[in-house]
Image (spheres, grey):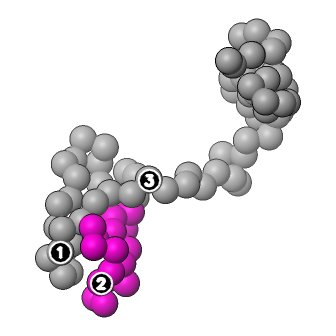
């Protein structure tokens, strides 16, 4: 199950230090109040941690049958791993 970060809408709380985490299923409803202080809260988007067994090296991506692109310039993305999709993507 994913861990979601929540923060009070006011941005400040002495009880939860302005941020708290909750383990929830994706299908579960978002929390609307902090369970500690009762303030209205909102779910935040947080960075995903990848590494270890979930390495994102080019070899692991290729072996998984995926494709990886890397930004090569302004609106230009080049394929660095895998064989699916075009060699270069141009975004206007």
Q: In the figure, 50 relative to 89: above or below? A: below
User: Which dot marks residue 13?
Assistant: 2
Q: In the figure, 56 relative to 21: above or below? A: above
Start and end of the magenta stretch? 5-23
- Which residue does the numbered mark 3 point to in the structure image? 45
Q: In the figure, 31 relative to 64: above or below? A: below
Separation of disc 1 and disc 3 at Cα?
19 Å
Mark 2 or mark 1: whose residue is earlier in sequence: 2
> Residue visible at 27% across and 67% down?
9
Residue 60, position as x, y percentages in the image: 76, 34
Mark 3 or mark 2: whose residue is earlier in sequence: 2
What SS does tag 2 mark? loop
What SS does tag 1 mark? loop
Nearest the eye: 32 or 53: 32
Contact, mark 1 vs mark 3 (Cβ under 8 Å): no
Residue 62 appears left or right of 30: right
Residue 62 visible at all = no
Contact, mark 2 vs mark 1 (Cβ under 8 Å): yes
> Residue visible at 31% across and 43% down?
26
Nearest the eye: 32 or 81: 32
Residue 40, position as x, y percentages in the image: 18, 68
Mark 1 or mark 3: whose residue is earlier in sequence: 1
Q: Residues within 10 Å of mark 1 (few under 14, many from 20)?
A: some
- Which residue does the numbered mark 1 point to in the structure image? 39
Q: Residues within 10 Å of mark 2 (few under 14, many from 20)?
A: some
């Amino acid at each position: 199950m994913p861990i979601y970060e929540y923060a009070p809408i006011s941005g400040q709380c002495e009880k939860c230090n302005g941020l708290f985490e909750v383990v929830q299923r994706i299908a579960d409803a978002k929390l609307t109040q902090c369970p500690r202080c009762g303030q209205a809260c909102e779910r935040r988007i947080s960075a995903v941690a990848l590494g270890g067994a979930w390495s994102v090296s080019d070899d692991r991506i290729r072996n998984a049958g995926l494709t990886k692109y890397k930004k090569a310039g302004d609106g230009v993305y080049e394929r660095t791993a895998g064989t699916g999709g075009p060699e270069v993507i141009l975004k206007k």
